[in-house]
Image: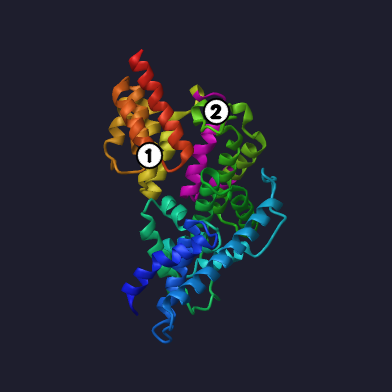
Amino acid sequence: MDEVLLRTLTPTVIGVLVRRGADFAAAEDAVQDALVEAVRAWPDDPPRDPRGWLVAVAWRKFLDAARADASRRRREVRVEVEPAPGPSEVADDTLQLYFLCAHPSLTPASAVALTLRAVGGLTTRQIAQAYLVPEATMAQRISRAKRTVSGVRFTEPGDVATVLRVLYLVFNEGYSGDVDLAAEAIRLTRELAARTDHEEVAGLLALMLLHHARRAARTGPDGRLVPLAEQDRGRWDTQLIAEGVDVLQRALARDRLGEFQAQAAIAALHADAPTVEETDWVQIVEWYDELVRLTDSPVARLNRAVAVGEADGPRAGLAALARLDPALPRYAAVAAHLRERDGDLVTAARLYADAARSAPSLAERDHLTRQAARLNARLRG
């Protein structure tokens, strides 16, 4: 296998697909799939025209992905924008595909990445952002997962925990990303909850419902991001909140706490507060302590620093933040918020501008840029 040749041909093949009408990200993904196929097939049957072979296979992969994406979008159209309470009445093979992609021969991280790409319809770039790793690293991880399962019989499905992780990431991408997958993730989690007596399935469903209940208030009429503290709570869906709290309470009653139940408990405390001033930040910090104990997640520690800053004051929040890696995504935004609350407007304005430059979405970048401009205007005035 001539790896140098493959690397040399990759940009050319991507260019051909783009000229044929594929967008750049989709072309990259299709070519990655074709390269995996080349690694498998070429040693035994090298093509006479490597470039033509790669173009043909990559174009077929692109068309297959486009058809799968169109099918997924048609399923989403059939799902109401606000998912109806109660068990799912619509069943298809999608959930089974999630389990099959979570194959025991894969590590959980690889199974999640493969499922998000093959079934969830996310691009390699979106998956990399969800995992907080470079896109090239994620492309290699997905390629290795495909090689691992090539030729494997999918007769032994994966476990519930891996499928939950996939559904969680799909929901997060749908809730805050470029592709609207949130309603589909809720539908599948409802279906899984109806099939499985598992407290963490219930915890994830509760978390999704509580977050989805705030969706209408998350953006203003002009499309701008509205932070939780500034949201019009009258626009929150009380029916979804009530259902989420009920599902969560029944899960917590089983006394087998998991990370999704802990996250749902935090979301429930936010949903329960009539105003931002009445938020029970002390209890939220306690739930973040549980979440950190369960996951040791740097993102959980970052969010905990925000909660500590609200419960015990900005200096306490900054002390908690100082123990974290400044390279952590959204670190600068949290530092800016705490610095502003502590009265250091100069540093806060600089940090908001720094955070805007590394924001993962246009809406978040716009919000952070406006925060920096607001403080700079105060300083000039």
Extreme residue toward the bottom, this view: 44
Please indicate, yes or no, whether residue 17 appears anywhere in the rendered image: yes
Q: For mark 1, what is the residue? A: 330
Above or below, 189 against 342 in this view is below
Rendering coords of residue 220 (x, y %): 57, 30
Rendering coords of residue 362 (x, y %): 47, 39
Q: Secondary structure at mark 2?
A: loop
Q: For mark 2, what is the residue? A: 231
Name the foreground residue: 205 vs 328: 328
- Is the residue marked by circle 1 packed among few (<14), some (14-19), or many (20+) residues within 10 Å? some
- Quarter of the N terminus within the rendering: bottom left
Q: Residue at x 52, y 38 (%)?
A: 267
Span colored in magenta? 249-276
Q: Residue at x 53, y 74 (%)?
A: 156
| In magenta stretch: residue 250 | yes
- Is the residue marked by circle 2 packed among few (<14), some (14-19), or many (20+) residues within 10 Å? some
Tag count: 2
| In magenta stretch: residue 153 | no
Q: Is residue 243 left or right of residue 321?
A: right
Q: At label 1, which amino acid type do we have?
A: Arg
Q: Residue at x 47, y 57 (%)?
A: 24
Q: Secondary structure at mark 1?
A: loop
